Amino acid sequence: MNWLDLVTALAIAQYIWFGVLVGQARGRYGVHAPAVTGHDIFERYYRVHMNTLELLVPMVPAMYLAARYWSPVWVAATGLVYIVGRFIYLRAYVSDPKTRTLGYALSAFPLLGLLVAVVAGVFMAA
């Protein structure tokens, strides 16, 4: 479980880092809190941060549930794919939102795979 804990901590740190990037973008583009609109590039950073939260919430419990039935090392590796996908998503979305597909796929498919793994594990254990 140590690898799983490390990957979870990395995913949380990534989310925090994305929040820092949003704060920097606020200053750079003059979007004062509580506003979440006002400059296109700021809005892209903000959406990446919020989308990351939307996926992180189910990702963490899915990893821990899947690790009950499958190798925690493989589950952690799946979590790493998610983290890499989030960085690709950030880079693509900020540059041109139309190019975000690969990053999103590398973020969403690991989550879906873990959910399938949990369901399969439950049925196999029953």
Image (tube, grey):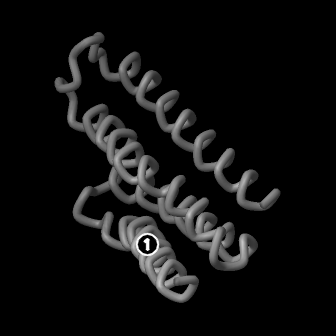
Q: Element at badge 1?
A: helix
Quarter of the image with the N terminus in it? bottom right
Residue located beneath label 1 in the image:
115
**Nearer to me, 107 or 35:** 107
At x 46%, y 50%, the residue is: 56
In the rendered image, the residue lying farthest to the front is: 126
Residue 114's x, y, as percent?
Answer: 49, 73
Q: Report the front residue among 22 and 122.
A: 122
Residue type at mark 1: give it. Leu
Q: Residue at x 73, y 52 (%)?
A: 5
Label 1: few (<14), some or many (≥20) within 10 Å?
some
In percent of width and height, residue 74 lies at: 69, 77
Vertical side of 119 occupied by 31: above or below: above
Residue at the spot 52% in from the left edge and 40% down from the top edge: 15
User: Which is more toward the observer, 116 or 86?
Assistant: 116
Q: Position of residue 12 (x, y in %)?
A: 59, 42
Query: In the image, is residue 14 above or below residue 90?
Result: above
